[in-house]
Image (tube, rainbow, N blue to C red):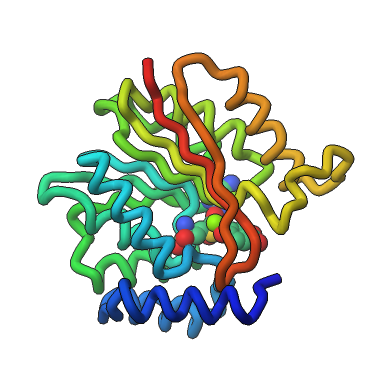
Amino acid sequence: MAEPLWTAVDQYITEMLVPSDAALDAALEASAHSGLPAIQVTPNQGKLLYLLARLQGARRILEIGTLGGYSTIWLARALPDDGRLITLEVDPRHADIARANISRAGLDAMVDLRVGRALDTLPRIAAGGAFDLTFIDADKQSIPEYFRFARKLSSRGSLIIVDNVVRDGRVIDAGSHDPDIQGIRRFNQLLAAEPGVCATAIQTVGAKGHDGFAIVLVTV
Ligand code: SAH
Ligand code: DHB
Ligand code: MG
């Protein structure tokens, strides 16, 4: 649960550093209006994704979990004109709203939205060159499998970012029966044992409560 102070500070940071923007505001508005769950990244987190993609000089981005395309828009805006982003979404209703939001943001040509279970669509993503950045943000029980795919679709220097790896601190409950928590914990074990990567995780508090993300640099 988000403490009111965390939300107020997120609002302050956003007012100071993340100016409002017609396409992003419209995406949030359309998503809320259509009844999508408000689980997209916060504006300051969206800008962090944008900054990381720019730091990375990303030309190819993979996103797993589109929802209404809010994080998609942030990430796609970091791409050069000939950059490409593939985003994967299982829910056709989410995908329809995302398509409209992405289109309104003028990013149609850059974004390739594929509808289906990510575990089904991922194997069909041809090795058209590695992804410079992958954002994993779909169902949490499958994070280990998504990470394996992301690792295969990466090359030296690629970045993999995984959202929601703390979940109000429930990540440390080894006895948890929640498949999401189990997925995150299996992912951490996999990550710890994975050769050729350098990784950490960061806890966050804010408008979405206490959570966190993992950042993985592929080094080999
Ligand atoms: N990245 C978005 C939020 C994604 S929310 C943002 O920050 O703006 C998680 C999304 O993953 C939801 O839209 C959900 O429908 C989708 N999802 C859940 N399971 C999935 C699966 N197996 N394959 C693909 N997408 C999935
Ligand atoms: C949930 C999913 C997310 O990707 C997120 O950032 C927050 C919450 C959820 O399914 O509850
Ligand atoms: Mg998330």
Q: Is residue 34 left or right of residue 114?
A: right
Q: Is residue 194 left or right of residue 47?
A: right
Q: Nearer the viewer, residue 6 or 143?
A: 6
Q: Residue 73 appears at what percent x and percent y?
A: 31, 62
Q: Residue 200 appears at what percent x and percent y?
A: 53, 36
Q: Nearer the viewer, residue 143 or 110?
A: 143
Q: From the image, which quarter does the C terminus lie in?
A: top left
Vertical placement of 188 versus 207: above or below? above
Residue 183 visible within the image: yes
Number of marks? 0
Q: From the image, which quarter does the N terminus lie in?
A: bottom right
Question: In the picture, residue 5 is in which quadrant?
Answer: bottom right
Vertical placement of 98 versus 50: above or below? below
Residue 117 visible within the image: no
Q: Is residue 126 left or right of residue 2?
A: left
Vertical placement of 115 versus 97: above or below? above
- Residue at figure coordinates x 55%, y 19% from the top left: 194
- Residue at figure coordinates x 18%, y 45% from the top left: 83
